[in-house]
Image (cartoon, coloured by chain):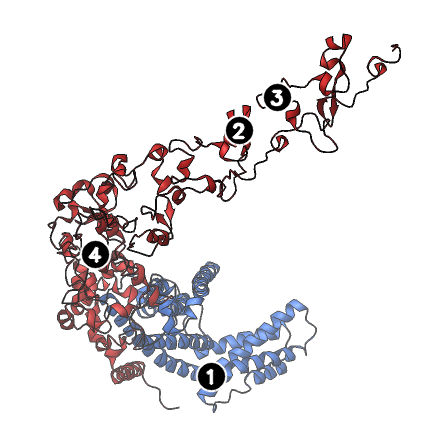
Amino acid sequence: MRIVHRLVLSALYLLGLGTVAIFAWKGQGYYLTPLAERPRHPLYWQLKPGGELGLVFGITGATMMVVMLAYSLRKRLPWLSSWGPVSLWLDYHIFLGLCGPLFILLHSSFKVQGLVALSFWSMVAVALSGIAGRYLYRQIPHNSAGDELSLAELERQDAELGRELSEEFRLPPEALRRLDALALEGTDPGRSLAALVFRLPFDLSLLRLRLRRFGRDYPQLDRVRRRAFERRLFKKAVLLRRMAFWQRLRQLFHYWHVFHKPFAVVMYLFLLVHVGVAVLTGYGWVSH
Amino acid sequence: MGEPLSRSQALAAAVMAVALVMAGRGASAQISPGPMSHAHAGLDGSDSCLSCHSSGRGVDPARCFSCHGPLSQRVKAGQGLHARADYRACERCHIEHQGRGFELVYWGKAGQAAFNHALTGWRLEGRHARLECRQCHQPAKLQETARLKAGKVNLDKTFLGLGTTCAACHADPHAGQFATTGCASCHGQESFKPTSGFDHQKTAFVLAGEHSAVPCAGCHRPVSSGAVRYRGLSSDCASCHQDPHQGRFGHACASCHTVAAWSEINRSGFDHRRTGYPLEGRHARVACEDCHRPGRPMKIAGAERCASCHADPHGGQFQARAAAGECGECHTVAGFVPSRFTLAQHQATRYPLEGAHARARCAGCHGEATPATIEQAGAVLAFAGPRPATLERFRFAATTCPDCHADPHRGDARAYLGADGCRSCHGLERWREVRFDHRRTHFALEGAHAKKGCIDCHRPSEAGKAGREIRLAGAPRECLGCHVDPHFAQFDRGGTPRPCTECHGLEAWAPSHFDHDRDAAFKLEGAHRAVACVGCHARESLGGKSFVRYRPLGSSCTDCHGAEVKP
């Protein structure tokens, strides 16, 4: 099931991003033409926002943006919980949140002004914050169903990983303590939230290097077991760091919602107005 | 970091913030995809969308026409570029929301000059195709400007309102003379002149003859308004031509003249008898202007007199005659020659013609002479023009033979002439008929000489400049002066020819009165008497000419009979 989901999602990304890439490539002559000269370009009547293709891009993008709301419904409507885990819905939510804006970008023909500008930049803000939110989401441990894990559950997982390292890889208790100290290095509770956000990726990369050095102290493992050993080391270290940041990441994620959703609301509002105006001014599915 | 906001509070705050931002920037202005062009600047803003757009139709031409009334009327009438099916969508050409500076009318890459004017339903041809747009589309040439102004049309920029008639742009130089036919029936669009479409032959006045070569302005002249008059011209000749006859022959010029040329008279149409001077004889064949000279009055004064037209070729030699030299006395209209002056009339002159003179050609006597010669004879000559070098002589100072004839004898006969002059010897019938007694000379004609003609002895000389000469004086009296010696001087005596008459008579050459026994040293005796002359006098040849040998001949027997003959 998980593999099927990945295959479908990969195909959708290939289709969506490929389509955008092809039309962007084909229309580069038009898109790279200065705005004042575009009306004289041969592709103007196809690629302008209200053009034969431009309108298709817009409707496709807007549809994606609307369908993307299904994820919010899934989270809020209990009767939808039987329709797969939240993480699966989130994957499609992210796909739509990435491809939809790209189609809208084609629809705008890279010309952003007026109401469209506000709507567009709201969309950009929503999309970029979505990418950041996805990153933060990954930093807060969830179960396979997508439900957030409690601190006690995290501690239990940490104990389980410690036991595996001791029993399976004969890691002495002293080494386990050194591993924990290595993992919690730089997790000072006094660090600002901003410093935490911006340093997190860097700290994890640094941690991976340190853990690799740490693992070399135990050379008796063959290559396959060494990789499994190093995965356990990294998993335990990351888990420890997440446990250390758990409270603060949850706080950050809360703020992220505050940022992500208003822009989404604004975006949908303007999308509604934009579509309304377009329909009112005569732009339907078939452009004029 | 303080206490975090509740989710709903944060959401509401964010929406409010964005809403405030929108309100602050003017939400209405945000709906438009871009500012309007300068021409439509008044339509900027969300409350004007439906001025052009309508639901389900996009940019709705009907809404555009609500402002562009004059254009709407043309489209409804099916006129002009915008009435074409492929030009009905306003926004396809007039692209909006591109900002104030955007040119609302796009003429294509080649620009306005390359616009295919035929799309408007009015193809530009000839020089029209090379004009700048505003040379025609300018306020001064627009029609119904009031209506255009009412429709808020900018007359300086519009392409509406220009008529398609020539008069819409061009002043009518013909002042409406061709209002019903239109300019194009005559003038092409390449140039006003020449009038490529005009064919005068299709008018009521077909040009023929010399009319074809007359420039237009020769007939079509400006009138008081300044316009050249093309219509309403009379086809009467007198409407253009002055009557050189001053009405004497009526107004029907064509009854005599043709359009081929003024001088070419329609003879069949003109009866010269109407003038009182019927054309007869050679007169009927001469050109009119030979008599009716250009620049002179058509009526010829004294036309009944030949001299009114003809110069007197005789220079007035006949002025002294009773008819005062009137030509008709001798000539007729049938021709100058032959003269009708008869022999009988000549006999009544001071010199009646006799003998051969009556048969001689007139010119034989009345030949060419210099005016001075004729004047010396007492004539008073008068010439209409310059004096000719010679003219026929009809006046003579005297009528003696030498006055006409040259003396072939060069005066040799003067001593023998009587009062009759030449006629003392020669008759009037024939020159050779001579009456002369030769005995009056030193050489009386006897025998055969009396039977010979004069010129048998008086041989005419070869004709020289002065004519043949028959000299009379100096004729030889000795035989050999006229005759050739057939004996080749056998009978000369001491180098001096002996007179022929010693042997020959004057009546005839033979027989001679020669006696062999008397006149020769060798007497004929015996058998010699029976011998023919040629038996002893054989014929010989000398210098290609034969002669009879008479002397010297030997008198011994062997001279004739040879050595074997014994004496």
As measured in the structure, the alpha-carbon distance from the residue carrying label 3 to the one carrying label 2 is 16 Å
Q: Which residue is mark 1?
A: A197
Residue displayed at 72% across by 20% down: B519
Chain letter, blue:
A
Q: Does the CB distance between marks 4 and 2 fall below 8 Å?
A: no
Chain letter, red:
B
Above or below, B127 against B211 in this view is: below
As measured in the structure, the alpha-carbon distance from the residue carrying label 3 to the one carrying label 4 is 84 Å
Q: In front here: A285 or B306?
A: B306
Q: Which residue is mark 2?
A: B445
Q: Amino acid at mark 2?
A: Leu
Nearer mark to the viewer, of 4 and 1: 4
Q: Amino acid at mark 1?
A: Val
Nearer mark to the viewer, of 1 and 3: 3
Query: Can you give x and y, in whole percent of width and height, for residue A255 in the image?
Result: 37, 82
Discs 1 and 3 share one subunit: no
Q: Amino acid at mark 4?
A: Arg
Task: State the quadrant of the C terminus of chain B.
Answer: top right
Nearer mark to the viewer, of 2 and 1: 2
Discs 2 and 1 share one subunit: no
Mark 1, other Cα within 10 Å: few <14 / some 14–19 / many ≥20: some
Q: Which residue is mark 4?
A: B296
Q: Amino acid at mark 3?
A: Trp
Chain for mark 3?
Answer: B
Above or below, B509 against B61 in this view is: above
